[in-house]
Structures are given as C-alpha cells and as structure tokens.
Amino acid sequence: QVQLVESGGGLVQAGGSLRLSCAASGRTFNNNVMGWFRQPPGKEREFVAVIRWNRDSTNYGNSVKGRFTISRDNAKNTVYLQMNSLKPEDTAVYYCAAMKSGYGLGYRDYEYDYWGQGTQVTVSS
C-alpha cells in the first residue's frame, strides 16, 4: 500500500522559513514525478512545485518562484519543500503528490496518482 506522509508544517511569522517533508512508502518513487500543491482557505488547490526523475528538472508556481525550493533524496524516498520568505498568503494546507509515471509536466493535480493527507502551514503577519 502506497503512502505519502507530509510533515514539517506549522505556524511561522511572515519572513520566516519552514521545510516540508514528504516520505513515501510502499514503493520507490526515484524515477517518478513528484509535486507539491496547496489549498488556501476557501480556495481551490493550486500547483506549487514539481520535481522530475532528473533532479535538475524542477518548476514552480509563479507565486512561490524564487522563495521555495523542491528537492528529493532518493535514498530516503523523500521529497522536500524548502519555503523561505514566507508571506501570509502562503497560508494553506500543503499536499505532496506522486505520479506512477516518470514523465509528465506535473502542473495539474489530475496528473498525479497518489496524495498525502496534507500538512497545515500558517503564516502570521
């Protein structure tokens, strides 16, 4: 049974940093596309970042570009999201997702096959 478990969320002041982790179990995702999405209160889920099998291949949503960094540790079957210069508008539930495939753009949530339960990030002003 495949599981994605996010951790690292919490309450932080504006300008602060958090690092989210997504630990996968049940299969390895070393050659798969993995992404982060978020859902702000009262809004739809939105794309945050994606990393492909080639760890140099990453993309980010416009609102987080230059502040967030996605990375992966294949030995640990874990994906990370380093979030710096956090803003109140970054407040959301953050979800990790994984594709069965190693190929895909990864910008749309329907591309993904597995999802974590989400972790809350709250940024105070």
Image (spheres, grey):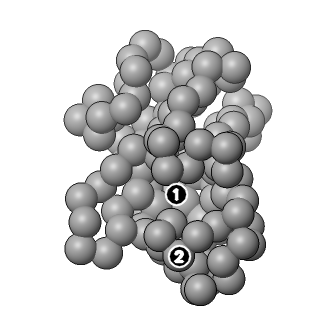
Residue count near mark 1 (Cα–Cα under 10 Å), binned few <14, some 14–19, many ≥20: some
Asked if the residue under mark 1 is in contact with the one under mark 2, i.e. CB atoms within 8 Å, the reply is no
Q: Is residue 53 visible?
A: yes
- Depth-wise, is mark 2 or mark 1 nearer the camera? 2
- Residue 113 lies, with reference to residue 44, above or below; the image says above
Residue marked by disc 1: 5
Q: Position of residue 55 (x, y in %)?
A: 68, 22
Residue occupying image coordinates x 66% and y 77% = 14
What type is the residue that disc 2 sits on?
Pro
- Residue 66 lies, with reference to residue 90, above or below; the image says above
Residue occupying image coordinates x 64% and y 15% = 54
Residue marked by disc 2: 88
Residue count near mark 2 (Cα–Cα under 10 Å), binned few <14, some 14–19, many ≥20: some
Q: Position of residue 17 (x, y in %)?
A: 73, 67
Residue occupying image coordinates x 43% and y 36% = 98
Q: Nearer the viewer, residue 22 or 70?
A: 70
Q: Position of residue 9 (x, y in %)?
A: 59, 71
Of pointers 2 and 1, the one earlier in the residue sequence: 1
Which quadrant of the figure has residue 108?
top left
What type is the residue that disc 1 sits on?
Val
Dot 2: element: helix
Is 84 positioned to the left or the right of 110 in the image? Answer: right
Inter-mark Cα distance, 2 to 1: 24 Å
Q: Nearer the viewer, residue 114 or 107?
A: 107
